[in-house]
Amino acid sequence: MSENVLLERRGRVALVTINRPDKLNALNIATRKELAEALDELRHDEEVRVAVITGAGEKAFVAGADISEFAGRTAVQQRAVMKTRNIFVTAEDFPKPLIAMINGFCLGGGCELALSCDIRIASDRARFGQPEINLGIIPGGGGTQRMARLIGEGKTMQMVLTGEMIDAQEAYRLGLVNEVHPAAELETKTMEMANRIAEKSPVALAMAKTSVKNAARMNLREGLDQEVDLFALCFSSEDKEEGVRAFLEKRKPEFKGR
Ligand code: COA
C-alpha cells in the first residue's frame, strides 16, 4: 500500500491505520490520497465486511489537517484540495460499516473523519475538538454539518466557536462517541464489535447503513419511503432466505453476501 496509511486484514475486518505518528497523524495531501485509495481497495474486497480506521502511535487518532500545508495557499488552491478527493465523503459513502477507533487526539479534520464513520469507539485518553477557529478558519470537512446532525446545534456551536478540547467522557456524554474504553482495551473492544457486525449479512448491512444515513439527507417521508424500498430489496438476497431459515431451524445463519 503506502507509508502514510497501513492496511491490514484480520479475517473479515480490515484495519486502516493513518501512519504519521511524529506529526500526530495530521492529514496532508499524500495521506488523504492514500486513505481514499485504501478505502477504494476495501470497497471492492468481498472478504472484508467491516473496516476500522485508527491512528498510529499512542498519542493521536488524527490531529487534523496538516497545518503546514495551509501556509501560503490561495483560496482557489485550498478549494481544489478539498474538492478533488474529499475523504470525508469517501468515508461516508463507503458501502460497508466503518468504525473509528479513536486512540488519542481527535481534532479538526480528525474529528470530522470520525464523524464521517458510522460508529466511534474512543479510548479514555482520547481528546476531541474542532480547533479551526484558533487558526482563523472554520471546519471544512463536515464538522459544522455532521456534528450538528449527530449531537445538535447548541453543543456543536460550543465546540466550533470555542475551539476547546473535551475529554472522552464528555464526548460520550454529548453523544459524540458510542463507547469509551480504557486505552489498553480499546483495540480488543473495537475488534469485538467489528467482528460481531461482520457476522451479519453484508447485503443487509449495506442497506441498513444507507437507510440510516438517509435520515440526515432526506425529509422524514422520503426517508421512510426509501426505508421500505431497501427493506423490500433485502428480500431479493440469498442472505434473507438463509437468515429466516436459520431462525426457523434454530441455528446460526451463515451469510454469504449474496
Ligand atoms: N498539522 C501539522 N502538524 C501537526 C499537527 C497538524 N494538525 N498537529 C500536530 N502536528 C505536529 C507538530 O507540529 C509537531 O511536529 P514537530 O515535532 O515537527 O514540531 C508534532 O506534530 C507533535 O505535536 P506537538 O504540538 O509537539 O504535540 P503536543 O503534545 O505538544 O500538542 C496538540 C498536541 C494536538 C495539542 C497540538 O499538536 C496541536 O494543537 N495541533 C494542532 C491541532 C489543530 O489545530 N488541528 C486542526 C487543524 S485545521
Image: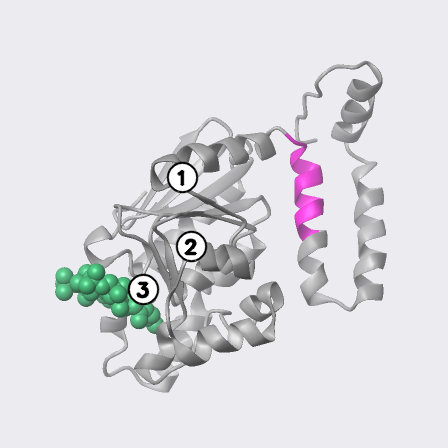
> Which numbered disc, 2 or 1, marks the residue closer to the eye?
2
Measure how far apart labels 2 and 1 are at the Cα level: 12 Å
Measure how far apart labels 3 and 2 are at the Cα level: 28 Å
Report the amino acid beneath label 1: Leu
Report the amino acid beneath label 3: Ile
Residue 68, horizontal then vertical, whole percent: 22, 72
Q: Is residue 69 left or right of residue 158?
A: left
Q: Is residue 226 magenta?
A: no
Give the answer, above or below, for where 190 lies relative to 128. above
Locate residue 231: give its quadrant: top right
Residue 241, horizontal then vertical, whole percent: 81, 26
* Label 1 CA crowd tier, 10 Å (few <14, some 14–19, many 20+): many
Q: In which quarter of the image is the N terminus?
A: top left
Report the amino acid beneath label 2: Ala
Locate residue 243: give its quadrant: top right
Q: Is residue 158 left or right of residue 70?
A: right
Q: Are marks 1 and 3 in contact (CB under 8 Å)?
A: no
* Label 3 CA crowd tier, 10 Å (few <14, some 14–19, many 20+): some
Residue annotated with mark 3? 29
Q: Which residue is drawn at 53% across and 41% down?
A: 44
> Which numbered disc, 1 or 3, marks the residue closer to the eye?
1
Residue annotated with mark 1? 186
By secondary structure, the bulk of the magenta-drawn segment is best described as helix
Mark 3 and mark 2 lie on one chain; the one further toward the N terminus is 3
> Which numbered disc, 3 or 2, marks the residue closer to the eye?
2
Within 8 Å of ligand 1, the CB of disc 1?
Answer: no
Q: Range of the magenta residues?
A: 200-210
Within 8 Å of ligand 1, the CB of disc 2?
Answer: no
Residue annotated with mark 2? 168
Locate residue 130: give its quadrant: bottom left
